[in-house]
């Protein structure tokens, strides 16, 4: 599991774009300009994901590699160290959850824009 694997997975999602607004060592993924994922180039790979607060707590209790996200709202964001201790399917599920949380919070105007993409 490397950064390119996650990059390809995420960019297949509808209305996703990537950028580096925080510098050269972090890629930010947004859906309609709303952030849902950040990937840090550190080794082991570290990703930050939006998460439902109750699920965030559950995931932190299940996996030592998941902690409250640094510099983010710790109730709604998790940092995930991709070190092989969390199954890949679980990480992909967390990415999907993060994306869905953002899409489900769109305003009516944003929903129309999203549908058009």
Image: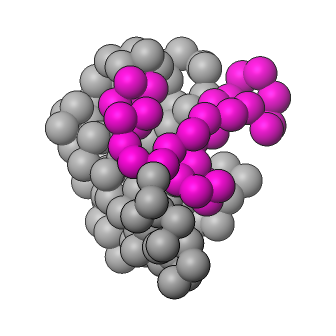
Colour scheme of the picture: one colour
Quadrant position of residue 107: bottom right
Q: Residue at x 45, y 60 (%)?
A: 116
- Residue 37 is situated, as x and y percent measured from the top left of the image, at 52, 46
Q: Is residue 5 magenta?
A: no
Furthest residue to the front? 116
Q: Looking at the picture, tell me which residue is in the foreground, 93 or 109.
A: 109
Judge left or right: residue 73 versus residue 46: right
Q: Is residue 104 above or below residue 93?
A: below
Q: Is residue 25 magenta?
A: yes
User: What segment carries the magenta color?
Assistant: 6-35
* Quadrant where the N terminus is found in the figure: top left
Judge left or right: residue 46 versus residue 70: left
- Residue 62 is situated, as x and y percent measured from the top left of the image, at 26, 54
- Residue 75 is situated, as x and y percent measured from the top left of the image, at 54, 71
Q: Is residue 58 above or below residue 68?
A: below
Is residue 7 at all visible to an observer of this figure? yes
Q: Residue at x 57, y 49 (%)?
A: 30
- Residue 92 is situated, as x and y percent measured from the top left of the image, at 27, 41
Q: Residue at x 61, y 20 (%)?
A: 41
Judge left or right: residue 36 versus residue 103: right
Q: Residue at x 32, y 69 (%)?
A: 55
Quadrant position of residue 34: bottom right
Q: Is residue 117 above or below residue 58?
A: above
Q: Looking at the picture, tell me which residue is in the foreground, 113 or 105.
A: 113
Judge left or right: residue 51 versus residue 19: left
Is residue 51 at all visible to an observer of this figure? no
């Amino acid at each position: 599991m490397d950064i390119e694997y996650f990059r390809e997975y995420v960019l297949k999602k509808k209305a996703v774009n990537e950028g580096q607004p925080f510098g050269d060592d972090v890629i930010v993924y947004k859906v309609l300009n709303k952030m849902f994922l950040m990937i840090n180039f550190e080794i082991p790979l570290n990703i930050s994901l939006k998460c439902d607060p109750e699920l965030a707590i559950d995931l932190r209790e299940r996996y030592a590699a998941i902690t409250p996200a640094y510099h983010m709202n710790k109730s709604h964001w998790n940092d995930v160290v991709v070190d092989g201790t969390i199954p890949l399917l679980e990480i992909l599920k967390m990415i999907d959850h993060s994306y869905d949380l953002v899409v489900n919070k769109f305003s009516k105007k944003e929903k129309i824009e999203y549908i058009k993409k």
